[in-house]
């Protein structure tokens, strides 16, 4: 089995970011910090803004998933399988994934029926004393989730639709262009641009059909009403214009990920060049800068108008991709919203994601580091192995928050576990990561039997005779017979994985100062993204051993040190002084 450790890592990083952000957002007393923002240390505002930005990076997981999905599709075709078989496989897999996405959003995850019930465990005694009783009270505020939230267009829904649409698209393009890489890449770029160009018109068209869609819960179809027509037509409207992450424009992200996947899946590694990823990284950087300028312009227009709360609401909803339209009823003063404001938000978040993906691929796959990198990032990669399950059981955060709060409620602040100050929140976050580490480590030993991914694998095998035969053959080869629960098992035999390097370590010409030149450029990028400065400094000693103390590595160390030093000074100042003390009352 061959795998890219960089792609596995990126998938896991997406989930790690999600766990950290959700732990903070579900536990921290954010209203308190926002109300007191002028009177508390300024670092709180910076952290809050960073949380809001990273919470909008759902497109990162979609982009990485698209890269992995395309590599898988290309390998499928390289084995001599037909495009018809490919389309069938993608459609079946996508529909099953969509089914579980709906079940997760309505019943299983932290915002669904199960999550709402577990969120209220600390109030069960109070609810039991009401006239409605415990279960009557719980049903009164959790019934909407189980009856209508299956039409919440979360990232998993988007991925499911993209698996289907991307599969059909790739089957058509592969048949038309007969595997010509350049023509298929060009076609995907054209399709991505078309999807983005059509987005505003599609949203407007759906709004004409159902004025106000998807706002005020108009995208949902309540099962209690048993209106089959409503359930049917809203099923098709959801991917077009539902919130928070509709296929328009996010199919474009999937198509861009497909471009990366097609290029990386080439059997002849010599055809895979660093220039391709360098150009993509530059494109991502341009998208990010243009998007950020437009995004901040939206916020500043609200602030100039004196509508601070509306400006902060724009920031707070950075992850809600449908909120940046002039007909969104959620925001006050919409006349200030830039027409096509959604495009700036889209470019900002997804440009950043694209640049980061290309950077990691360059750092790992072009430097012969795949196997070492895989061993060092095992926990993070586990998060990506069963990413859907990791997301679905995030109600663990509630339970651990209750535990932490119960130990010292007066110390951790607030009236409840979801109103704690930073101390209690960070302890909860630490416990969340520990619990996930232990849980996934143990679960891996039984190949994640019982996980969402295992359930999906079992269903796919039920509908795919070729998958069943493949698994049966693999068991028979080792003298065993496949049992019913073996078909959905996740392959965790990392000892037999061949970690792919695009360029092997011994192929790197260090006489050309390849790594030094790369880290020199990375140091410049670290002006905008400080973690890259740490990467440059950590890599400096090894680079010097291989390439000597040349001007490029010296410049990299100097620039990275300056950037890191400035960042530490700024963080120190913001950690000491309040907004008022700095003359910036908010």
Image (spheres, rainbow, N blue to C red):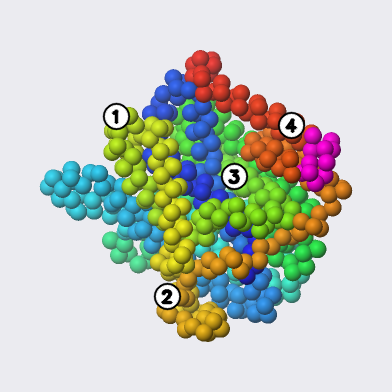
510 left or right of 79 in image:
right
Determine the CA span between mark 4 and mark 3.
26 Å
Q: Earlier in the sequence, mark 1 or mark 3?
A: 3
Residue 506: give x, y in percent of width and height. Answer: 80, 57
Determine the CA span between mark 2 and mark 3.
40 Å
* Res. 258 in view: no
Q: Residue at x 66, y 71 (%)?
A: 75
Residue 214: give x, y in percent of width and height. Answer: 44, 51
Residue 536: give x, y in percent of width and height. Answer: 71, 39
Determine the CA span between mark 4 and mark 1.
45 Å
Q: Which residue is mark 2?
A: 485
Judge whether residue 90 is colored magenta: no
Secondary structure, magenta segment, majority class: helix
| Of the two numbered discs 1 and 3 in the rendering, the one whose residue sits closer to the viewer | 1
Q: Residue at x 33, y 39 (%)?
A: 404
Q: Earlier in the sequence, mark 4 or mark 1?
A: 1
Q: Which residue is mark 1?
A: 410
Q: Earlier in the sequence, mark 4 or mark 3?
A: 3
Task: Say above or below: 53 vs 575.
Answer: below
Q: Which residue is mark 4?
A: 559
Identify the disc placed on residue 349.
Answer: 3
- The residue nearer to you, when weighing 259 against 168, is 259
């Amino acid at each position: 089995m061959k795998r890219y450790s960089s792609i596995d890592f990126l998938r896991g990083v997406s989930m790690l970011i999600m766990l950290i952000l959700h732990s903070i957002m579900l536990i921290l007393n954010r209203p308190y910090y926002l109300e007191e923002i002028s009177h508390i240390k300024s670092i709180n505002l910076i952290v809050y803004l960073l949380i809001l930005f990273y919470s909008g990076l759902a497109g990162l997981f979609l982009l990485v998933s698209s890269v992995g999905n395309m590599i898988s599709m290309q390998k499928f075709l390289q084995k001599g399988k037909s495009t018809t078989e490919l389309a069938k496989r993608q459609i079946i897999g996508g529909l099953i994934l969509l089914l579980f996405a709906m079940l997760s959003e309505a019943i299983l995850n932290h915002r669904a029926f199960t999550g709402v019930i577990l969120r209220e465990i600390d109030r069960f005694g109070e609810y039991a004393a009401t006239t409605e009783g415990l279960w009557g009270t719980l049903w009164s505020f959790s019934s909407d989730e189980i009856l209508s939230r299956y039409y919440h267009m979360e990232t998993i829904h988007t991925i499911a639709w993209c698996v289907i649409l991307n599969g059909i698209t790739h089957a058509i393009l592969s048949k038309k262009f007969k595997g010509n890489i350049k023509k298929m890449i060009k076609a995907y770029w054209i399709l991505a641009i078309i999807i983005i160009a059509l987005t505003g018109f599609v949203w407007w068209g759906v709004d004409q059909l159902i004025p106000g869609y998807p706002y005020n819960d108009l995208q949902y179809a309540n099962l209690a009403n048993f209106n089959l027509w409503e359930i049917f037509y809203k099923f098709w409207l959801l991917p077009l214009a539902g919130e928070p992450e509709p296929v328009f424009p996010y199919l474009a992200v999937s198509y861009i990920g497909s471009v990366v996947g097609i290029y990386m899946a080439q059997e002849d590694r010599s055809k895979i060049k660093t220039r391709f990823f360098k150009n993509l990284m530059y494109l991502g950087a341009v998208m990010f800068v243009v998007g950020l300028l437009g995004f901040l312009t939206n916020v500043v227009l609200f602030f100039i108008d004196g509508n601070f709360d509306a400006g902060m609401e724009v920031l707070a909803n950075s992850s809600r991709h449908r909120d940046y339209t002039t007909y969104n009823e959620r925001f006050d003063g919409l006349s200030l919203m830039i027409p096509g404001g959604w495009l700036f938000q889209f470019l900002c978040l997804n440009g950043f994601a694209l640049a980061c993906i290309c950077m990691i691929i360059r750092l790992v796959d072009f430097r012969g580091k795949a196997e070492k990198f895989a061993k060092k990032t095992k926990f993070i990669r586990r998060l990506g192995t069963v990413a859907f399950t990791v997301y679905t059981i995030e109600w663990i955060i509630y339970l651990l928050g209750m535990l932490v709060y119960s130990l010292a409620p007066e110390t951790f602040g607030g009236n409840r576990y979801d109103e704690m100050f930073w101390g209690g929140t960070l302890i909860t976050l630490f416990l969340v990561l520990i619990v996930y580490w232990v849980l996934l480590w143990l679960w891996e030993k039984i190949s994640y039997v019982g996980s969402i991914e295992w359930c999906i694998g079992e269903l796919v095998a039920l509908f795919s005779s070729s998958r069943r035969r493949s698994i049966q053959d693999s068991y028979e080869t080792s003298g065993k017979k496949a049992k019913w629960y073996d078909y959905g098992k996740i392959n965790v035999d990392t000892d037999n994985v061949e970690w792919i390097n695009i360029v092997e370590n011994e192929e790197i010409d260090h006489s050309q100062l390849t790594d030094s030149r790369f880290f020199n450029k990375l140091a410049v990028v670290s002006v905008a993204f400080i973690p890259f400065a740490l990467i440059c400094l950590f890599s400096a000693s090894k680079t010097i051993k291989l390439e000597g103390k040349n001007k490029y590595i010296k410049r990299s160390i100097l620039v990275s040190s300056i950037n890191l030093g400035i960042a530490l000074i700024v963080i120190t100042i913001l950690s000491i002084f309040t907004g008022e003390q700095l003359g910036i009352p908010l």
